[in-house]
Image (spheres, grey):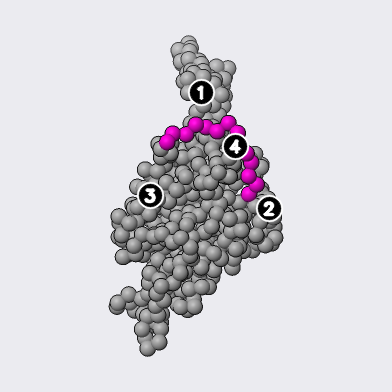
Amino acid sequence: MPDQPRGRSLRIVGSLLLLAGLAGNPWVLPFLTGAGRLPLSQFGRALLAAGAIVLGVAGVYLLSRNVGRMRTDLGNFALLAASLVFCFLLLEVFIRWTAPASVFYPNLSFYPHRNLTIHVKLHGVSPVVHFTTNKWGMRGDPVPDDWNERRTILTVGGSTTQCFYLSDDKTWPARLQALLRGVYPDVMVQNAGLDGHSTRGHLLMMRKVVPIVKPDLIIFLVGLNDLSLSISEKERLFGARSEMTGTLYWIFSHSRVVELLFRWYQVVVNKAPVVQTQRFSHPNGFQAERLRNPTPMPASLESVLPSVPEFRDNINEIITLAKRQHVKVLFLTQPLLFEDTPHWRESASAVYWLKRQKYSISAATFRRMLDIFNNSLLEICDRRQVPCFDLASAVPHDQKYFYDVAHLNEVGAERVARAVSAYLLKTDLLAPEKGDVRAGALAGPAGRPTRVTGADAGPSERSAPAR
């Protein structure tokens, strides 16, 4: 008899759990809340579905199981749970022992000593690409023991800085190093670009990487991925995993097992290609398509770009952190194939890396949106007295320089490297400062710093003053 009240209580709990499981899944919950579509990533929806299944199974168990057998079941469940936890920890230790982790911070994908050979069909790109990383997980020459005694540069940005589909020696940071060594033989450039990174990720770089690496100069190429945060709601809400915060992302960042399972999920479920194969093909460059059913846009495009204020805040915070860490910075505006001309006003933007775009816009409108970010960058740098080179004006809107709409091919990377190196030499950003212990090693004849003034930084240069 004493078990009867307990049995009724368990039945009530079981009924509530079953109802919660039936109502709290990603297919039913939107209709109950009137949300239409839950603002969750695909991973979040999967977690919600898994939680609903667990609640439903628990509810069915409490409704159907004999009360007297539950104590035995509880012991079995505890033993099973302990075994699963032990196996998980054992697997975590094994993966950490056998596979290298990110060097600086779990969220940042700096994996050391990668050596990839990639076959591609891209306009202006060699068919076989060699991608390697050094002990820091960055693209560039091996990090020397006397790194702190050299003139050092870190390039930070997204895929247009990383240059994944260009071989190591063809990227613009590598070509920049080669050009600068004509004046500063010991200069070292490390490519810290990461695919998908916006200024959200650059802030993380400033906090987690720069205090360890301590470069003399950081070059930021920014704007494109911050624009993506406005055009795609999914990008703005979830973005790159390295830029997210919260419990789920902390677990993802600190568990190699969870990270491995997620990568397998991407390959098996999302059909993500393995890295040795080409992800896409642009042998003839960007193929414009006629714009159909465009979304009406307001006169002020900034009103439909919710990530602009965040972009400005992030740039200001990056500058503040750089000054606090006594690191020089140079910002670059983002070049683009599109321009605001009649041809591009009739062409669809067709930016393939953005999923579920909110707007159907022309290529010219996309260009004008990017100009808002570029101009914001120039204005902030002018106000904060930080150097900013308008690279967007130094690279012509010509397919000759891009393999798609924004990513540089080999000719484009060379163009960028020459423009940036000329700007650096003209502004003396790399010249040894008074009292610098490295001045002797990096000086010209008679121990004086070598200076090149009046260098041409490329056509249509427009920059904030370097003070």
Q: What element carries label 1?
A: loop
* Residue at image mark 2: 284
Q: Is mark 3 on a helix, strand or loop?
A: helix
Q: Which residue is drawn at 38% across and 69% down?
A: 427
Q: Are circles 4 and 1 on residues that touch, CB within 8 Å?
A: no
Name the mark on residue 36: 1
- What crowding class fits label 3: few (fewer than 14 Cα within 10 Å), some (14-19), or many (20 or more)? some
- What crowding class fits label 1: few (fewer than 14 Cα within 10 Å), some (14-19), or many (20 or more)? few
Residue 106 appears left or right of 449 = right
Q: Which residue is drawn at 56% across and 62% down?
A: 413
The one of 218 and 241 positioned closer to us in this rendering: 218
Q: Does residue 292 show up magenta in the picture?
A: yes
Query: Residue 167 location in percent, x, y?
Result: 62, 63
Q: Quadrant of the C terminus?
A: bottom left
Q: Residue at x 55, y 54 (%)?
A: 397
- Kindly report which numbered mark, 1 or 2, lies closer to the viewer in this rendering: 2
Q: Earlier in the sequence, mark 1 or mark 2?
A: 1
Q: Which of marks 3 and 4 is nearer the N terminus?
A: 4
